[in-house]
Image: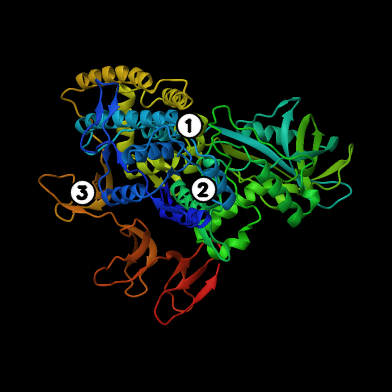
Amino acid sequence: MSDLVIVESPAKAKTIKKYLGGNYEVVASMGHVRDLPKSKMGIDFENNFEPQYVDMKGKEDVIKELKKYAKKSEHVYLATDPDREGEAISWHISNMLGLDINDNNRVEFNEITKSGVKAGMSNPHKIDLDLVNAQQARRILDRIVGYKLSPFLWKKVKRGLSAGRVQSVAVRLIVDREKEVKEFVPQEYWSIDAKFTAPSSRKVFAAKLSAIDGKKAELSNKEETDAVLKRLENAVYTVTDVKKRVTRKQPAPPFITSTLQQEASKRMGFQAKRTMKAAQELYEGVEIEGMGAVGLITYMRTDSLRISDEARDAAAKCIEEIYGKEYLPPSPRVFKSKKNAQDAHEAIRPSLPELTPDRVKASLTTDQFKIYKLIWERFIASQMANALLDTVSVTIEAEGCTFKASGYSVKFDGFTKLYEEKKDSEEENNKMLPPINKEDILKLKEILGNQHFTQPPSRFTEASLIKTMEENGIGRPSTYAPTISTIISRMYVERDGKQLRPTALGEVTTDLMKDHFKHIVDAKFTAKMESDLDGVERGETNWVDTLDVFYKDFDKVLTKAEKAMEGKRVKVPDEETDVECDLCGRKMVIKIGRFGKFLACPGFPECKNTKKIVQATKGTCPLCGSKIVLKKSKKGRNFYGCDGYPDCNFMTWNAPVEDKCPKCGSTLFKKGGKSGKLLCEKPDCGYERNL
């Protein structure tokens, strides 16, 4: 009889089967097989919150297959993902198959390579019931909030709404930020910027006024600025101090889940969901030419910066071979994880550092390659030597006014030869100053007073929202991507380019929650709840007690809110447009329905006219000259089509641009990213050019 290994996905099963050989059957459960019922609460509040699990609908054939394989196997090993969710899936499968809960049948693979699978199979252990209970507590808590609070929102705001323990706080963060932006009052301020040349060079360099008569320069209007400029007329600008030093710049640590999502968003515009999909595929295994199925990265849901000694040694060998010994640090680099990190897994890294991105590129999809390259470069760079910068700071004095100039040049590029972390706002600070000496008299080339206004706080992007959630302890690595997807699909939040904005529905719902359910939308309360649940995971806290404390307070608050809102409803304000109703001439408004936004006549029920919202572009159809409009496919992908449909069937995946074809005058379309091309889609034209 062969042994059975159960994993979640077919891709993972295929890769593991390759390493285990013919004495093992490896089958996939396709994720969870049991859950709380959808049709009812499924929790026995009178019996210590006992969950009433049922087999999931649509999983009948999978369950039947698992039971069939288990029956004819000598041993059954549960090899679901090495996290809370994976532990719970293993526990459910164990119960479903009637396995002994005290058996050492749980195996974990931090990486799906030959050595990773061998290590996992060599160390089977019991299912960790603390992990299972932590997952159960989270699931029950989310079910209580969702199934108790959502009906309240249906009655008071709009049918079909949902509330969630983490999603409601995420929406509040975005709503509060939007209020800050709208209420922000810009403050005027001025700067004085000068350009000089030094005696020994003709190179022009910039300096900024930093102090006046020994006090920080704070100019609030043109009059104050003009007075300083008047004072500086015919002034002599003398260099009073030159400071030179060597600055060491350290590499960023290898990725954890949140930083991978943030960096992929900043560098490539990837949504968190897209990043995690590609990372999951890389972890589970990809067919590599000449090697077969290989798991290319370690487990991608982690908050730990720990790296194994073997991986560190492999990285050092790789660095020495590619870049030379001088690019290795004096001693191996170690990064410390945050205080509240679970530290259950290593940081995200390539499982085989010797597999460079170029070596595997031909075997990967575009998204897989981009994510693998990002992970590989970040990890290898994290183990490289510091960059060394020659920095210069210059102080210039004239008529009691102090100017400052600074610059640097790269002495040794170190890790930056391979990778440098992308900042939220890239500053142009890689400027070399010409040779300058103390007591030099500088020649003034230009001096200007420049008006500025303080800027409102930036709206959240996916990257900055994930960063804020992580910093505030809201959610955990596995929840960031699904939380963002949920609040957008529920239409509490919408994308505006890369920015996230609350909808009117999101604002109204959040205000109602703040009035009646302060704890649910309070970041500190949610973070404490997460910390309590982590305590369950560590075996320090009883999961039933944790739920009991939460539920007693929540039930009272819900009862109080229902009484306070009895007979009342909150109206979601309509957004008026400049589109006139074809039937009655009123200005149509934007409403939110089951399938998203649409235009409706405010004269309802007298006038029941509705329309689809059409997002016009700047282009015209190359076939009939009508407008090109943005549309969505059934899978949610953007495409562009003729407004004259169905009379004209023109469509394209390429985005129209303002430029016209120099050959025929039609709209040009952009294909690909920054290194793509512009092309004309008019039949028989054929014009195209690289960007």
Q: Is residue 267 visible?
A: yes
Where does the image place residue 100, in percent across and percent down from the top left?
38, 35
Q: Residue at 10% of width from left, 46% of height from top?
A: 606
Secondary structure beneath disc 1?
A: loop
Q: Is residue 499 above or below residue 369?
A: above
Residue corresponding to mark 3: 600
Three-letter amino acid code of the residue under disc 3: Ala
Q: Tell me the quarter of the picture where residue 574 sits.
A: top left
Residue corresponding to mark 2: 265
Q: Residue at 31% of width from left, 40% of height from top?
A: 96
Secondary structure beneath disc 2?
A: helix
Relative placement, left or right, of 442 versus 484 is right
Where does the image place residue 45, in percent across and percent down from the top left?
25, 22
Secondary structure beneath disc 3?
A: strand
Given residues 414 and 13, the one toward you in this image is 13
Q: Earlier in the sequence, mark 2 or mark 3?
A: 2
Q: Earlier in the sequence, mark 2 or mark 1?
A: 1
Cα distance in 3D space between marks 2 and 1: 30 Å
For the residues bearing labels 1 and 3, Cβ distance under 8 angstroms: no
Three-letter amino acid code of the residue under disc 2: Ser
* Mark linked to residue 556: none
Where does the image place residue 635, in percent across and percent down from the top left?
33, 57
Between tags 2 and 3, which lies in front?
2
Q: Is residue 420 visible?
A: no
**Neighbourhood count class around disc 2 (C-alpha, 10 Å): few under 14, some 14–19, many 20 upward:** many
**Neighbourhood count class around disc 3 (C-alpha, 10 Å): few under 14, some 14–19, many 20 upward:** many
Three-letter amino acid code of the residue under disc 1: Val
Given residues 224 and 595, the one toward you in this image is 595
Residue corresponding to mark 1: 185
Cα distance in 3D space between marks 1 and 3: 35 Å
Given residues 616 and 227, the one toward you in this image is 616
How many numbered tags mark residues here? 3
